[in-house]
Image: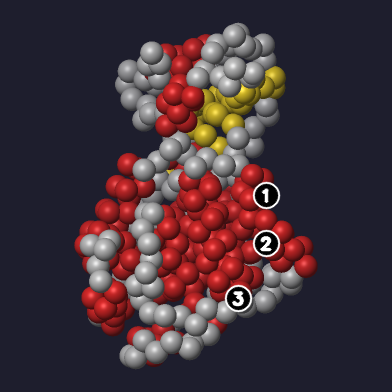
């Protein structure tokens, strides 16, 4: 759920410092809104006691929302008014607070138990809650975008094809915008860029989009296209940094979310790999690995991959049905796995980029680093 917080901060940056947004995504002065605060507060509650009794959890949450730091949080007037009583019955974007809290609980596989309040869920908000949780869960398992879209079912598809979701203000319309921004993206950064080009509440769209995109792409590095930076200072990837005020005011939940995301990952995601997002030309090459037997355990190790280092310089990442091989910021190869009759897998559709370093020898080196038994 770090992605939701980044999306919220990026939306602040988009509204206050457009140049910084395109070149670095998040400004040092950026503040989270009630949506980012919802994620932070829920993470803090889970870290403190995931089984906290309901009334105690309610007091915990009220204190966090009423005593927020103005140095790192910028809440809307509607939310500030709501925190005075926490009376249910509000409408509009404030449902996003509850939906993101429940998505955070789903991310950490903790029952939400209505830890904030008993919102009067309408059908639309209930569907939004269910769909967002489902997206995050499936993407974190390594499902492709199209596989997730199929599993979301006919209700989601009908809304996507028949609603005027680009302009309506309901929760499900915002989630449909976030899904569209993610679906058309090629990494975490471009998903947030897509979301900010849409109309409406950018803070909510940023949080929804970041939560979804972070589940597939990760968000350790901000990958920036060359056109958004000056040639003198161009770097294809930037380590994602946080506003100092946010880290000063909310260090424990920030570290908790980051650490749990690392420990619970199933695959190595694109925006955690040191590579780039420029457009590449892919060319099929002869595959010397057609007879290499990959069982379920080897597949699991391949998905999980590793952090490249001095001794293991070639790395893997997983994106939308493909394994990619890279080294030192250069994307080299990609391939897929196909399952055969004995339920093991074989490497197929091996392709290389136009990079001068791209050759099948890179895959030999990367596979060696997996230390398959």
Q: Which residue is mark 3?
A: 123
Q: Which residue is mark 2?
A: 156
Q: Earlier in the sequence, mark 3 or mark 1?
A: 3
What color scheme is it?
secondary structure
The answer to whether 203 is drawn above or below residue 188 in the figure is below
Q: Position of residue 28 (x, y in %)?
A: 35, 61
Q: Quadrant of residue 27?
A: bottom left
- Residue 347 visible? The answer is no
Q: Quadrant of residue 356?
A: top right
Q: Which mark is residue 39?
A: none
Quadrant where the C terminus sits is top left
Q: Residue at x 37, y 54 (%)?
A: 108
Q: Secondary structure at mark 3?
A: helix
The answer to whether 343 is drawn above or below residue 8 in the figure is above
**Residue that extends furthest to the right in the rendered view of this protein:** 162
Q: Earlier in the sequence, mark 1 or mark 2?
A: 1
Q: Residue at x 55, y 71 (%)?
A: 126
Q: Are marks 1 and 2 in contact (CB under 8 Å)?
A: no
Quadrant where the N terminus sits is bottom left
């Amino acid at each position: 759920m770090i992605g939701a917080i980044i999306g919220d901060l990026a939306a602040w940056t988009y509204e206050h410092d457009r140049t910084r947004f395109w070149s670095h995504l998040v400004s040092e002065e950026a503040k989270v809104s009630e949506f980012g605060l919802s994620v932070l507060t829920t993470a803090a509650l889970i870290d403190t006691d995931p089984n906290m009794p309901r009334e105690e959890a309610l007091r915990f949450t009220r204190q966090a929302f009423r005593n927020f730091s103005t140095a790192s949080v910028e809440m809307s007037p509607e939310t500030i008014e709501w925190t005075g009583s926490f009376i249910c019955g509000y409408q509009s974007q404030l449902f996003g607070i509850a939906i993101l809290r429940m998505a955070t609980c789903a991310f950490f596989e903790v029952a939400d138990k209505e830890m904030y309040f008993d919102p009067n869920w309408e059908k639309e908000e209930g569907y939004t809650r269910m769909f967002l949780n489902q997206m995050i869960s499936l993407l974190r398992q390594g499902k492709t975008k199209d596989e997730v879209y199929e599993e979301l079912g006919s209700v989601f598809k009908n809304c996507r094809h028949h609603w005027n979701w680009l302009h309506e203000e309901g929760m499900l319309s915002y989630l449909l915008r976030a899904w569209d921004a993610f679906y058309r993206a090629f990494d975490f950064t471009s998903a947030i860029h897509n979301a900010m080009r849409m109309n409406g509440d950018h803070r909510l769209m940023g949080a929804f989009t970041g939560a979804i995109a972070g589940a597939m792409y990760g968000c350790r590095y901000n990958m920036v296209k060359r056109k958004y930076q000056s040639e003198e200072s161009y770097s294809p990837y930037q380590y994602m940094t946080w506003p100092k005020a946010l880290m000063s005011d909310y260090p424990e939940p920030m570290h908790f979310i980051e650490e749990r995301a690392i420990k619970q990952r199933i695959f190595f995601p694109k925006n955690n790999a040191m590579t780039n997002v420029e457009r590449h030309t892919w060319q099929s090459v002869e595959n010397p690995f057609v007879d290499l037997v990959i069982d379920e355990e080897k597949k699991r190790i391949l998905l999980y991959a590793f952090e490249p280092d001095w001794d293991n310089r070639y790395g893997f990442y997983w994106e939308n049905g493909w394994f990619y091989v890279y080294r030192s910021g250069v994307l080299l190869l990609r391939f897929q796995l196909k399952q055969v009759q004995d339920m093991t897998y074989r490497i197929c559709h091996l392709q290389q980029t136009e990079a001068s370093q791209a050759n099948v020898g890179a895959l030999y080196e990367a596979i060696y680093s997996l230390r398959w038994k």
